[in-house]
Amino acid sequence: MNIESRTLADVTVLAEGLKFPEGPVVLADGSIALTEIDAATITRVGLDGTVDVIARCDGGPNGAALGPDGALYVCTGAVDVLYDSCDGRRLSGPNDIVFEADGGFWFTDTGKFRGRQRDVGSVYYAKPDGSLITEVVHPAESPNGVGLSPDGATLYYAETVTGRLRRRRIGGPGALQPAEPTDRATLVCGLPGHQMFDSLAVVNDGAIAIGTLLTGCVTVVSPDGATVTQWFLPPELEDHLPTNLCFGGPDLATAYITLAATGRLVACPWPGPAPGLRLAFQP
């Protein structure tokens, strides 16, 4: 695999001192809501750098997304609990979330490591009114970031431990076309060496941008997996834990990236060639 390396330009620090930031979401006024896993808070960062706590949670809030009712839905054990189990099995490590245009949402459960024991991960589909939750992929290897293709026909999810990006065709509301866990057709790409995928965002041309741990970059993968580009922060802003990103600003041409090791939220012009994909209920 040929991986091209480049450096992001004109990166601006919007906030510092955050405690393991994740789940950035652009709000209607242009400010950024994000989760602070180690602080158990949902936080708003204004474009002028002001930082305010929106809510406090039980447990560590992770991925977040705006829903059809304008509320912020967060993968956590927290504020108003929508789901904490499926078919009698408790959720283990809800991680990231993406809404479809009809209001249903897909989310990952990474699982948990407990010494010599482990909860294996899954991917779920649910409705925001609390009426339905169904497990659609199991077993899944540490699923983390999750997103939808521009046409809404493909679900992508990133595996943290393996550094692999997988895809599944959507067969209907809350349903995926059948595939075995080892089906090669589900694999978009896998990174060499010790690199780990975190959360992701989809670009308007269908590319998938993934926060890449340890390497400290955003990996951009074409839908067919043939082209892989890794975008690094400038040396003065290096961070080995870029956890997540979202798109906002005029024409969705600005990337907002959470950096967990240094506790920062940064912004930069997205290098393209296409801008970010507008999410289902993004203002």
Image (cartoon, grey):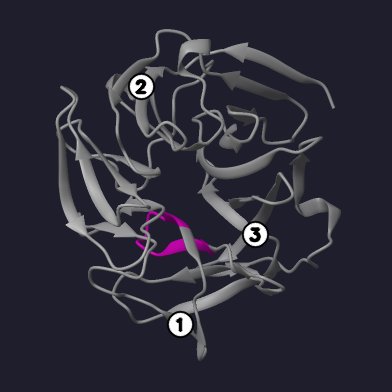
From the viewer's perspective, is 218 left or right of 128? right
Say which residue label 3 marks.
142
Query: Principal SS element in the magenta part?
Result: strand
Residue 118, numbered label: none
Residue placed under numbered mark 2 in the picture: 267
**Toward the viewer: 25 or 53?**
53
Q: Residue at x 50, y 14 (%)?
A: 271
Circle 1: residue type: Ser
Query: In what quadrant of the picture does the N terminus appear?
Result: top right
Magenta extent? 96-108
Mark 1, residue position: 85
Quadrant where the image shows the C terminus: top left
Q: Is residue 9 left or right of residue 225?
A: left
The amino acid pointed to by label 3 is Ser
Which of the two residues, 213 or 138, is positioned nearer the viewer here? 213
Asked if the stretch drawn in magenta spans residue 20, the answer is: no
* Residue at disc 3, secondary structure: loop
Give me the C-alpha separation between circle 1 and circle 2: 36 Å
Q: Residue at x 66, y 56 (%)?
A: 169
Q: Residue at x 81, y 35 (%)?
A: 192
- Contact between marks 3 and 2 (CB within 8 A): the answer is no
Q: Is residue 67 visible?
A: no
- The single residue placed furthest to the front in the displayed view is 115
Disc 3 from disc 2: Cα separation: 28 Å
Q: Which of the 4 quarters of the picture holds residue 191?
A: top right
